[in-house]
């Protein structure tokens, strides 16, 4: 196989004819496959079935004097705060345990900023003029949706192999209208990049012009290795405090891809001053979250070591699926010189870059063949990928045989779209 760009027109036409024939074969199969979202597979969900049958005595429902069955302890069961503190490497009094979704807590944080302002806001954000947020790209579409919900202008920041381009970030935060930045520091969605220690240190040391700048540190994949040993990253709360920015950061994580996505536990971690402020605001909204579910998770995961051991079981399932996708891309696409992709060691996604101007076409070809993917452009604010190149692949949910079939079709679609582009020239 030779790079397509080196072929003469007659050779391109032959390749196109063959690719089109292969694509028509995929269409004739009547496929109904879905690789659009990073959902755990049924095999992964089965790993946590013990949670569904747990029973407790009345005495076991009391944790550090807090009755899990009753009202109270808005910030969560003490044992659950300790569990998340152990996993994240923070202090228990810095942890707020909520319901099942970290996305809800992230949305809540921005909502509180908009309606009341954050701890150091001179006024609520809704009373201010233009609001801006820094968005490393490619990034997580649901982060972007939160900004869109409040009319916050999103400014794309290029991602490097070490995290956000900090030269760009440090220049942009001189604008007082820039109110925050989204970050997925470990196995970043969708690229799988782990922020370097140097990048994290520069982030913690930032001096934004806005006094209420908020670092939305979405540590969603903090224990989600697929291959290799556990990767430890610096404690962002401690680093921010060291640089005089203790109140700048909110860190988020959950058990959504550890136990049951629809019935897990989420948390945020922050400074004690932020905790007191947020608890006061949240007290008008909620009396307490599901502490019995928090108790179940404490018994099931126990501590950091227990959580990491459990995630090894997830990794054994996921590794085969990521290998299927990467190996097929290596075999059928890489030699053609028409795409590049990251090789993540953890997380849930593969970030694929097809030939410039071809991502939407690849997505449409896949859709017409009966295969659902995340929309082209979804990894950029407003769905606008200026290169029309990036696609997010989610290998976790389909069974291996279906995933292989979907990836074979994807390789064909990537080639077909590239050949259309080259022949149009």
Image (cartoon, helix red, strand yellow):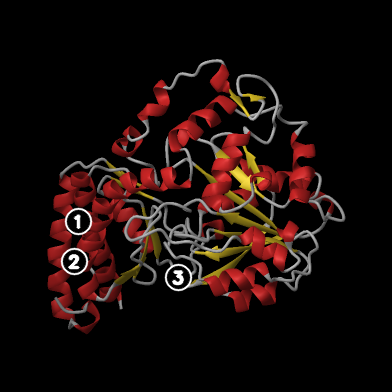
Q: Is residue 342 left or right of residue 182?
A: left
Task: Check residue 365 in the rendering and tell me which mark sits there, or answer none.
Answer: none
| Neighbour tally class for label 3: few under 14, some 14-19, many 20 plus, Cα within 10 Å | some
Please tell me which of labels 3 and 2 falls first in the chain.
2
The label number, if any, that marks residue 332 in the structure image = 2
Can the viewer see residue 164? no
Q: Residue at x 27, y 49 (%)?
A: 316
Give the quadrant of the C terminus.
bottom left
On screen, residue 122 versus residue 298, left or right, reads: right
The answer to whether residue 3 shows anywhere in this view is yes
Q: Give yes or no for contact between labels 1 and 3 (Cβ–Cβ under 8 Å).
A: no
In the rendered structure, find residue 387 and report the number of the disc placed on it: 3
Badge 2, how many Cα within 10 Å: few under 14, some, many 20+?
Answer: some
- Which label sits in the foreground, 1 or 3? 1
The answer to whether the residue labelled 1 contacts the one labelled 2, judged by CB atoms less than 8 Å apart, is yes
| Local crowd size for mark 1, using a 10 Å CA cut-off: few (<14), some (14–19), many (≥20) | some
Which residue is more in the foreground, 68 or 321? 68
User: Is residue 95 positioned above or below 136 on the image?
Assistant: above
Vertical relation: 74 (above or below) 162 = above
Give the CA distance from mark 3 to mark 2: 23 Å
Is disc 1 placed on a helix, strand or loop? helix
């Amino acid at each position: 196989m030779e790079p397509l760009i080196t072929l003469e027109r007659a050779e391109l036409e032959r390749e196109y004819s063959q690719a089109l024939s292969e694509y028509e074969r995929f269409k004739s199969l009547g496929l109904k496959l879905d690789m659009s979202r990073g959902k755990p597979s049924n095999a992964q969900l089965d790993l946590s079935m013990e949670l569904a049958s747990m029973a407790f005595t009345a005495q076991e429902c009391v944790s550090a004097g807090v009755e899990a069955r009753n009202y109270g302890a808005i910030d969560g069961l003490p044992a659950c705060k300790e569990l998340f503190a152990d996993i994240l490497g923070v202090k228990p009094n810095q942890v707020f345990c909520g319901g099942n979704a970290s996305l809800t807590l992230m949305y809540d944080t921005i909502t509180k900023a908009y309606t009341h302002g954050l701890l150091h806001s001179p006024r609520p954000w809704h009373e201010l003029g233009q609001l801006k947020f820094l968005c490393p790209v490619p990034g997580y579409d649901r982060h972007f949706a939160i900004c869109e919900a409040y009319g916050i202008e999103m400014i794309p920041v290029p991602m490097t192999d070490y995290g956000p381009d900090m030269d760009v970030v440090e220049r942009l935060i001189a604008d007082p209208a820039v109110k925050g930045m989204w970050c997925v520091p470990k196995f970043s969605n969708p690229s799988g990049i782990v922020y370097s220690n140097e990048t994290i240190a520069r982030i913690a040391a930032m001096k934004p012009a806005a006094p209420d700048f908020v670092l939305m540190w979405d540590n969603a994949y903090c224990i989600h290795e697929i291959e290799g040993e556990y990767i430890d990253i610096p404690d962002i709360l401690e680093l921010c405090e060291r640089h005089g920015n203790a109140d700048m950061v909110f860190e988020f994580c959950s058990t959504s891809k550890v136990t049951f996505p629809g019935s897990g536990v989420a948390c945020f971690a922050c400074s004690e001053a932020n905790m007191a402020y947020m608890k006061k605001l949240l007290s008008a909204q909620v009396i307490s979250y599901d502490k019995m579910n928090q108790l179940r998770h404490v018994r099931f995961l126990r501590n950091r070591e227990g959580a990491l051991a459990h995630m090894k079981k997830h990794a054994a399932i996921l590794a085969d699926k990521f290998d299927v996708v990467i190996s097929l891309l290596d075999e059928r696409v890489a030699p053609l010189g028409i795409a590049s992709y990251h090789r993540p060691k953890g997380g849930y996604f593969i970030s694929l870059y097809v030939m410039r101007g071809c991502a939407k076409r690849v997505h449409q070809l896949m859709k017409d063949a009966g295969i659902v993917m995340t929309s082209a452009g979804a990894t950029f604010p407003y769905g606008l990928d200026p290169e029309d190149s990036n696609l997010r692949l989610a290998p976790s949910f389909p069974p291996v045989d279906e995933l292989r079939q979907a990836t074979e079709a994807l390789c064909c679609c990537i080639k077909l779209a590239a050949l259309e582009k080259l022949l149009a020239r």
